[in-house]
Amino acid sequence: MHTRTNKNKQDLLQKSDKYHNNIVTTLLQSLIRSMVILTAYTCKWASVRGALPQPIVVLGISTAALCAPKRKRILTIIMTLVSLRTLGEALHGYVYGNEDWEDDVLEYEE
């Protein structure tokens, strides 16, 4: 009887409630989902309201990640993001000037 109770507890610990998956599988799914959301948000941030098309940002970051040496990969990705954001800011300022930035302030004040 005692071993059966331990087995039930172990089964409960290893299974998640929603899909009856292993805890590790659920953790990996959540981690991948979080990484996709973070990547999408970061690429949207770097594209500066569409001044720099998002596929170009994704291609630039992917290229930087694949071409960088292993020890400097994260630094290279960060520098690429900052460079793309700077380029996007310059393009946005060149095309729209300062007229398009005021609507952000008005949206947050209301």
Image (spheres, grey):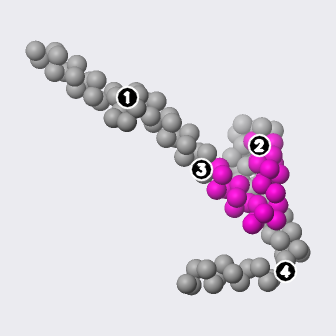
In the figure, is residue 4 to the left or right of 91?
left
Q: Nearer the viewer, residue 85 or 100?
A: 100
Q: Which residue type does callout 1 highlight?
A: His
Pointers 1 and 3 in contact (C-beta within 8 Å):
no
Helix, strand or loop under label 4: loop
- The mark found on residue 20 in the picture is 1
Q: Residue at x 80, y 50 (%)?
A: 55
* Circle 3 residue: 37
Q: Amino acid at mark 3?
A: Ile
Mark 4 and mark 2 lie on one chain; the one further toward the N terminus is 2
Helix, strand or loop at label 2? It is helix
- Taking the image as drawn, is residue 48 in sight? yes
Residue type at mark 4: give it.
Gly
Q: Is residue 24 above or below residue 108?
A: above
| Mark pair 1, 2: CA separation | 35 Å
Q: CA distance from mark 3 to mark 4?
A: 30 Å
Magenta region: which residues? 39-65
Mark 2–mark 3 distance (CA, rounded to whole Å): 16 Å
Q: Earlier in the sequence, mark 4 or mark 1?
A: 1
Mark 2 = which residue?
62
Q: Which of labels 4 and 2 is toward the front?
A: 4
**Residue at the disc numbered 4:** 97
